[in-house]
Image (tube, rainbow, N blue to C red):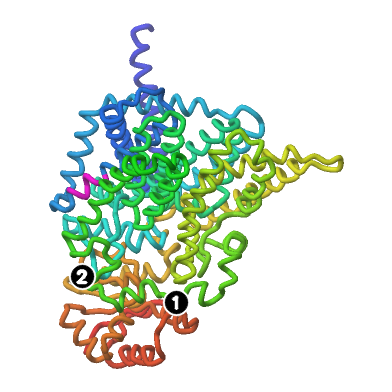
Amino acid sequence: MKAKRPVFAILVLAWAFVTLLVYYTFHKPIHVDQVFAIGGTLWGILIAGFVILAGAAVGRLFFSRLFHWHNSVSVESMAMEIGLGLGALGLVWLALGLMGAFHTIVAWAILLGIWITAHRYILNWCRDLLDEMKKITPKSRVEIWLAAFVFFMVITALISALSPPTAWDAMLYHLAGPKANIASGKVEVIPQLPETGYPQGMEMLYTWVMLLGSPRAAGVIQWFFGICILLLVRHWGEEIADSRKGWLGCSLLLSATTFTLMMGRAYIDVATIFYTATGFSALTQWKNTKQSSFLIFAGLSAGFAFGTKYTGVVVGIGLAVLILVAQPRKVLRNLVTFGLPAVIISVPWLLKNILIVGNPTYPFFFDGLGWDNIRANWYSQPGTGLLYTAPWKLVAAPFIMTLVGEEGAETWHATFGPLFLLLVPLIAVRWKDHRCRTWLRDALLLSLAFYLPWLYGSAVSRLMVQPRFLFPALPPLAVLSALAYDSLRSIKWRLFSAHRMIGVFIALVLILTVLQTGLDLLQHQDVSVLTGVLAEEDYLYHRLGWYYAAIEKVNDLQEGSLVLFLFEPRSYYCSPHRCLPDGILDVWYHARRLGGTSASLARAWQEEGVSHVLFYALGAQTLREKGLDPFTEEDWLELERLQDHQLTLIENYGDAYLLYELTP
């Protein structure tokens, strides 16, 4: 009997295997499409993780070699390392792009080279990160609930970051630019997309991950910058007061839902906020330790902030103000120590534009590559700001942007949530008694350094009424707001506690924020596309509507077709070298100001190789009805003549998009 046991065991296993195989042949638990969808999601996480850890290794290497910083590892030092490393790698990719080395082989060679040569730094950084994460475990019931809110918000942001890109600016230039760079193998400044002339520190990293095979990893990199910001906010709160203030500060920051949305998009704003936060941290450490290395790093942060966008120059100005206030007698020496690295890091982006278009600040201040005074005036639209339309709004701006501002709105398009407006003024309750008045003063000064330039821009041009420019000030303001809430403990009355009542209001806001975020997540069907329940094409139809249908038709046109966009700037999903986007919505305006007529423009476009025109009719109709842009009635009539006599309609997509063949 014992001899038969192995045979019997083999038969039992074979029977089990055959049974399960046949059953799941007819009852597939997961389809092939879902396997590929989940694999794509995991691939995006892996690629982003590989690049982030490569940046951490480079940053730690620089810290150990250049700064000789032997202090114990902290959240601040690790954030500085990741910022330094990824910023430096962005400059490396700029150099490679100028040499025409945007190739998949190069992308993998750099990634593998860093991992092989710096694996020790990567392992150490990961170990230190795990140690720091263990230290932030919530200690009380209130902290657990605040941490749960934070966890929910960052997970929803990660889901959005991994989803196929549908955000406006990502499809306009943050991802469309890298896609064009990859198609040409080098850094490009596209005249139809003047935004590609901006500093592109983040876009260089996006180009890298796209070369590695995962455009979705771009959003994850932005998301990780957001995680670093939250870790810094929590660290500040705990260092100044206690861990509960740290968790509350994180919750207040995420209650400004535009911040959460930006964490889930392949944008650049969160990186700008991050470099502001690391610069602020570095200056705080400089004041405490008097080590000039922190002053140098603050300058590097300012330079990397400029490398994300031109308006990042305000970060350098704000940090310089803090340096001036800290040591007015040594301001010249300190500003040189701070400013030199900031300039060194900033200059490559100016040199890039000089080499490509001859204008260091393209498209601003000087002409070049399709840019002239007509386009400059259109883009800046001087004389249309609040000073000329509603001066009283300049005084009431903080209240208006908080109370009526909403993501996606025509103006004031950002959601701050009500808590900053509610809590920040309350810091005056115990200002004199607070032991961290210097830190609080610096937070307010930095916020003012962002607010005043924004207020001036909003006064001059309606295009500057973008509250997102103020978001770099929010991390320190979040901690300040948490401390303001804590100061209410000193206000006591027999009938009720102000501290407790405001706590109820804060809890209500956080609950409503979770509800809104969860409903948006369900409506967008991000989870469905990541798990393969919804096909990516169906997801894009769901999110982008007629636009995606029109782009699909554009991509199906015969080889050699060239499509000019009118009133539609987004071109990310268009095949390479197929589309000419209307990057700043000025194609028709600029042509008309140069004296073009429907007939002459049709001939000129055909001579340039244009075969089709994609017209965003709904967008043009909105501009015409609201009269927001300086078109004349004759401009609109000439556009109608172009449609009637020079173009042949091929497809009509719900009267929103019209695809024409150019037949002059």
Tag 2: amino acid: Leu
- The residue mark sitting in front, 2 or 1, is 1
Query: Which residue is nearer to you in this view: 76 or 24?
Result: 76
Number of callouts: 2
- Percent from the top left, x then y, of residue 13? 37, 23
Q: Which secondary structure dominates the residues rendered in magenta? A: helix
Tag 1: amino acid: Gly
Q: Which residue is mark 1?
A: 383
- Quarter holding the C terminus is bottom left
Q: Is residue 573 left or right of residue 20?
A: left
Q: Is residue 622 left or right of residue 165?
A: right
Q: Which mark, residue 626?
A: none
Q: Is residue 371 above or below residue 11?
A: below
| Residue drawn at point x = 49 percent, y = 25 percent | 134
Q: Which residue is mark 2?
A: 369
What is the magenta range?
Answer: 90-95
Crowding at mark 2 (Cα within 10 Å: few <14, some 14-19, many 20+): some
Question: Gap between marks 2 and 1, in whole Å?
Answer: 26 Å
Query: What is the secondary structure assignment of the residue under circle 2?
Result: loop
